[in-house]
Image: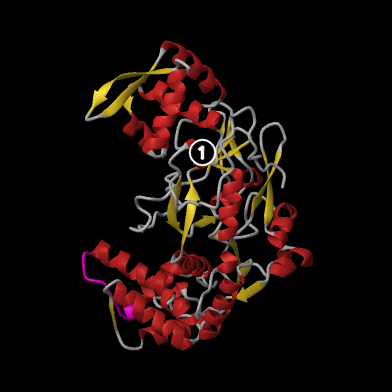
């Protein structure tokens, strides 16, 4: 592996080799933690510089380390005259940075402005991601049926979804626009999110910090068994779900480095590890399908990815996620056979039946509290199929009912679908043939 951190002692600066403890166990001393003592001392010094006087309890909460470990770090910094004891409050020491410490902290901040949660080592991150692989998830028919219960979907499609989820491999959803591919991909991620995984706030690689936890993506899970004893550098979350569309660029697939702050933000696929990554509207991104092919042909096959740090250093990280590609284009027209082979499951989301269309119309009308005359769904089906010559799609009932609701709001009346309102909605929604 390209940049796994050495856990050997080096001039006393490395902590002792860690045992089999994981995120479920809180390190209580420097001898029990996996990160170099020097990195933790530098982090504490920067926090004190930026925050001013703190109690050891407040400091431990800011860096997400145990009280005992933080107190040990303070003792080491105090012995170097970098911080000092200023008093006691409720038997808890109050500490502050010294002039010598301020000078040292200013130098450290010029090198990196990261002053957040203490990181975990890259080794521990890799080990934990492998333990939590999506390939170890077991999904059964009841799980899939429950997740998709609010949608009208053919049972054969559900069976294909369940099989694909158990594979832990890439999925290609394709078919005409309006078939519900994006919605289905999002529901697939909810099936996975029933499980929980540990996500680190930050990872340290050769002295460089990579922030991983993103509250907009990683949703915390409550577990009373780990609330007080777990390593607080990790967050217990539901399996993550990341969705990207046309905004995807090749730069988004590598480390996001800010030269001013001089630390890294993990790319989307690293944040999606142990969860689901949905590439929506595949083929319409700012990155061409061939570029994504060249970038991900190894990750999809071997479940490893290579990221580049400033200066060109390569880091090998796990690629442990379920990737879902959604496209209106046939996969064979987008990418070559070598790429398709690495997408183990291809599922076509095609036209729906009259019965499915009618049931979707009924559910949409119920949810939006819209009444409708008998025969309206059938009349809409006849128009789409006969007048327009189009297939029935799941989006049609929703979009037509929305048109009726908007018109009713304008006219300040209760929405109801009859022949008149249906005709108006059809004229507003469908491009009319010449």
Residue under numbered circle 1: 31
- Does residue 280 appear in this view? no
419 drawn magenta = yes
Colour scheme in the image?
secondary structure
Q: Secondary structure at mark 1?
A: helix
Count of all numbered marks drawn on residues in the image: 1
**Which residue appears farthest toward the top when viewing the image?**
99
The magenta stretch is 412-420
Counting from the top left corner in percent of width and height, residue 122 is at: 60, 44
Q: Nearer the viewer, residue 73 or 223?
A: 73
Counting from the top left corner in percent of width and height, residue 191 is at: 47, 69
- The quarter holding residue 378 reads bottom left
Counting from the top left corner in percent of width and height, residue 390 is at: 55, 78
Counting from the top left corner in percent of width and height, residue 414 is at: 22, 71
- Rate crowding at label 1 as few (under 14), some (14 to 19) or many (20 or more) other CA atoms within 10 Å: some
- The answer to whether 187 is drawn above or below residue 130 in the figure is below
């Amino acid at each position: 592996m390209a940049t796994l951190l050495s856990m050997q002692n080096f001039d006393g600066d490395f902590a002792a080799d860690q045992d089999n403890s994981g995120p479920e166990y809180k390190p209580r001393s420097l001898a029990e933690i996996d990160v170099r003592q020097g990195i933790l001392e530098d982090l504490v010094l920067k926090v004190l510089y930026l925050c001013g006087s703190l109690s050891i309890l407040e400091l431990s909460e800011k860096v997400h380390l145990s009280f005992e470990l933080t107190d040990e770090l303070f003792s080491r910094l105090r012995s170097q005259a970098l911080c000092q004891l200023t008093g006691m409050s409720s038997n808890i020491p109050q500490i502050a940075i010294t002039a010598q410490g301020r000078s040292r902290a200013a130098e450290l901040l010029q090198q990196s402005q990261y002053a957040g949660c203490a990181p975990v080592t890259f080794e521990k991150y890799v080990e934990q991601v492998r333990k939590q692989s999506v390939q170890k998830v077991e999904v059964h028919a009841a799980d899939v049926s429950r997740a998709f219960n609010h949608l009208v979907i053919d049972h054969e499609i559900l069976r294909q979804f369940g099989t694909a989820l158990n594979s832990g491999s890439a999925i290609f959803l394709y078919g005409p626009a309006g078939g519900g591919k994006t919605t289905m991909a999002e529901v697939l991620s909810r099936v996975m999110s029933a499980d929980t995984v540990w996500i680190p706030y930050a990872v340290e690689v050769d002295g460089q910090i990579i922030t991983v936890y993103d509250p907009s993506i990683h949703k915390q899970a409550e577990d009373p068994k780990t609330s007080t004893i777990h390593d607080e550098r990790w967050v217990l979350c539901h399996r993550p779900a990341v969705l990207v569309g046309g905004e995807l660029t090749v730069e988004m697939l590598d480390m996001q480095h800010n030269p001013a702050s001089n630390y890294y933000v993990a790319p989307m696929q690293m944040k999606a590890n142990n969860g689901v990554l949905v590439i929506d509207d595949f083929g319409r991104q700012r990155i061409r399908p061939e570029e994504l092919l060249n970038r991900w042909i190894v990750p999809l096959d071997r479940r490893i990815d290579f990221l580049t740090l400033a200066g060109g250093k390569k880091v090998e990280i796990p690629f442990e996620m379920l990737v879902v590609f959604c496209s209106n284009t046939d996969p064979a027209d987008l990418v070559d056979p070598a790429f398709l082979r690495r997408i183990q499951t291809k599922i076509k989301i095609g036209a729906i039946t009259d019965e499915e269309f009618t049931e979707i119309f009924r559910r949409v009308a119920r949810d939006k509290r819209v009444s409708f005359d008998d025969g309206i769904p059938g009349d809409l089906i006849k128009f789409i199929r006969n007048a327009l010559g189009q297939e029935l799609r799941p989006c049609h009932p929703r979009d037509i009912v929305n048109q009726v609701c908007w018109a009713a709001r304008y006219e300040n009346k209760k929405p109801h679908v009859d022949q008149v309102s249906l005709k108006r909605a059809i004229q507003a929604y469908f491009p009319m043939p010449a």
